[in-house]
Amino acid sequence: MTRTSALNRPRPRSARPSTLWLLGPAVLLLVVWTQVPFILTVYHSFRRFDLLNPERQGFVGLGNFGSLLTDPIFWTSVQNTLVLVGSVLLVTVAAGLFLAVLFHQDFPARALARTLVISPFFVMPVVSALIWKNMLMHPVYGLFARVAEGLGQRPVDWLAAYPMPSVVLMVSWQWIPFALLLILTGLQSLSKEQLEAAKIDGANAWQEFRYVIVPHLAQTLGVVVMLETIFLLTVFAEIYASTSGGPGLATTTLPYLIYLKAFGEYRIGVAAAGAVFAVVLANVVAVFVLRTIGRNLQGGRT
């Protein structure tokens, strides 16, 4: 064996320097940042923790969960949460898919148009809610009221007459750019030769969209739905700044109910039980939605 071949021979695995220790600080920070709060939440969900009576503490087992599940407001909040998430998903995915196909085309000032469309995603949720509440939907000096008066119609108090659709509208306005960006990224990998082949075969615009573009975006749409579902289940700031869960319980979602239990009734244990249920609900809804989309897309290919 020559000296050159000996030098080029790969070193034994045991002699290679390990790089796993470099990941240690990042993994430790991730565990501390994410899992420690969740473990503490689970811990408090099984204990009596009332800020008005701090001396009354102790293990209560499933008592907090029982108190939560027997509260009629809880089931209303779960229903409102599912309605909000489902409605926003439909609006954002449909609008994001339409806009992604539109902005995938070449036209003048496309870069500027893309920048303007994605700008709502960078607006803080509280600011977005205040803009919609005071500048657009206000029944006296809002933009919608001025337009209605200009058309000879009576202004509508949107947050009072249509509270949930109004919240869906303002949340969708912020999350359409998120869906647009991901779907547009997925479209970048679609070859033009595939679309040209479909046109040569006689496919019209709708057939190209239905049988070429949508199947190509199957995984991207799944990622959009999964990520949006997780984030939308935690929507709080928009409701807090616009409707405060009202009128009545019309827009009281599970995150807002957890806030009321913790900072309205000072029942930290019950609020922790609600937070644990919210985590379970997020996982169940995400898996269900992903499986439903997967079956529909697979059926569309056949």
Image (cartoon, rainbow, N blue to C red):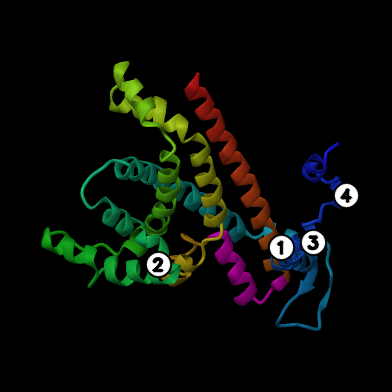
Q: Nearer the viewer, residue 110 or 237?
A: 110
Amino acid found under the numbered disc labelled 2: Val
At a point 31% along the width and 27% down the height, the residue shown is 206
Q: Is residue 255 magenta?
A: yes
The picture places residue 289, in percent across and down from the top left corner, at: 56, 40
4 or 2: mark nearer the eye: 4
Which residue is disc 3 drawn over? 21
Ranked by sequence position, the earlier of labels 1 and 2 is 2
Q: Are marks 4 and 3 in contact (CB under 8 Å)?
A: no
Q: Is residue 58 left or right of residue 284?
A: right
Q: Looking at the image, is mark 4 or mark 3 earlier in the sequence?
A: 4
* Left or right, residue 136 beside residue 159: left
Q: Which mark is residue 273?
A: 1
Q: CA distance from mark 1 to mark 3?
A: 36 Å
The nearer-to-camera label among 1 and 3 is 3
Count the marks: how many? 4
Name the mark on residue 14.
4
The numbered dot on residue 123 is 2
In the rendered view, tell whether residue 45 sits above or below residue 106. below
> The N terminus appears in which quarter of the rendering?
top right
Residue 53 sits above or below residue 48 on the image: below
> Callout 3, which amino acid?
Trp
